[in-house]
Amino acid sequence: MNIKELAKKLDLSITTVSRALGGYSDVSEKTRERVKKYANKYQYSPNPYASTLASGKVKTVGYVLPIYGTNTSTLNQGNFFQFISGMSEELLSESIQLQILFAKSEEEELKAYEKLIFEHRIQNIVLQNVKTNDKRIEFLNNYKINYVAWGKTKDKRNYSWVDLDNDKAIEIIINYLIEKKHSHISYINISEKYNFANERKSSFLKNLKLNKLKFNKNYYASVKLEEPEKSFEIIKQMLIKNKKISAIICSTEFSALSAIKACDFLNYKIGKDISIITFDGALVRDLSSPPITAASFPVKELGKRAINILLSKKIKNQSITFMPKSEIIERGSVHTVK
């Protein structure tokens, strides 16, 4: 049943039915309840593309999913789909459509956002894959788009975002390793042009210093997101040249899998000869062998909060942030040094 047929059965105007379903106060509570009752009876739900907000803008949220570099691997897209799952649950409850476009490069990402705004006329966007200095922030601000970022830039003021507390997460990981007597700790990062990678590196250096451990540049490597296949060779060579390394911190699940592969190649028993710890996700929780100890990363909750913030911002017009903390999830891949 469409809205025209529903309005005819109720002997009401289409506008009244639409506003009653939208919960507007200019429609009496009695009428709102009557409309909702009939809508349920005839299994009517608004077409998200036809439904409009009071401002006249389509009730749709836009999202661009990157599928380049590491993310060409469907195995490594788990976090994105967890995030989308969290968003979808909140959007479904509000009868709001999610419009997803795909991008095969950084250049395509910006074009995809332009397409969402200028072709699809979408005014509500969730931004992700945030860079340390991200020109998309200025772009969205210039066009007065209502948006929330998954991640934050180096200058994280004046816009809303959701993100893991990266600084605290690395602090927790370092302290956990030190409690297990590790002092030769390596770190495998991705390019610091992504701000979460930059934050994690800064925290790594800071917490080594706080614990009076000297930073060894040979224990640190950064792998381009566009060249994930190189992480195996980098980790393998690092372990061959630095025999004292007892623990590897991996900034991403993908590099954790490469670390497992490198250790297997060198006949190192994980959890006995060497330790690996990373950030949690389906790869290291369910698919890796062995499962890898990790810092918790509530991706689905971040997706939910992003939509909550996006919708509340439309009313309050203010910057809102959400930053959960991590805890260590033990899976046996970290040993105590004797």
Image: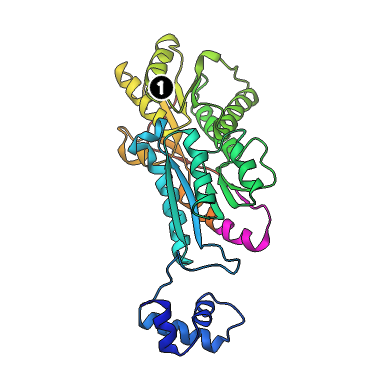
**Foreground residue among 230 and 45:** 45
Q: Report if residue 315 lies within the magenta region.
A: yes
Residue farthest top in this picture: 241
Q: Of 53 and 290, which appears nearest the observer? A: 53
For this rendering, which residue is in front, 76 or 333?
76
Q: Nearer the viewer, residue 323 or 41?
A: 41
Residue at the disc numbered 1 = 231
Q: Is residue 94 magenta?
A: no
Image coordinates for residue 272, horizontal then vertical, percent: 36, 24
**Residue shown at 49% from the left, 59% from the top:** 60
How many residues crowd around disc 1 within 10 Å: few (fewer than 14), some, or many (20 or more)?
many
Say above or below: 57 vs 228: below
Quadrant where the C terminus sits is: top left
- The answer to whether residue 324 is seen in the rendering is no
Give the SS element for disc 1: helix
The residue lying at 58 percent from left, 87 percent from top is 28
Q: Residue at x 46, y 13 (%)?
A: 244
In the displayed structure, does residue 309 sit left or right of residue 86? right
Q: Is residue 166 left or right of residue 12?
A: right
Rendering coords of residue 247 (x, y %): 45, 23
- What amino acid is found at the position of numbered circle 1 in the picture? Ser
For the image shown, how many numbered marks are present on the structure?
1
On screen, 94 above or below 100? below
Q: Position of residue 129 (x, y in %)?
A: 51, 38
Write down the region rendered in magenta: 308-323
At 53% from the left edge and 74% from the top edge, which residue is drawn? 22
| Residue 126 percent across, percent down from the top left | 53, 49
Image quarter in which the N terminus is found: bottom left
Does the rendering let one see residue 214?
yes
From the viewer's perspective, is residue 256 above or below residue 60? above
- Residue 289, relative to residue 145: is it above or below? above
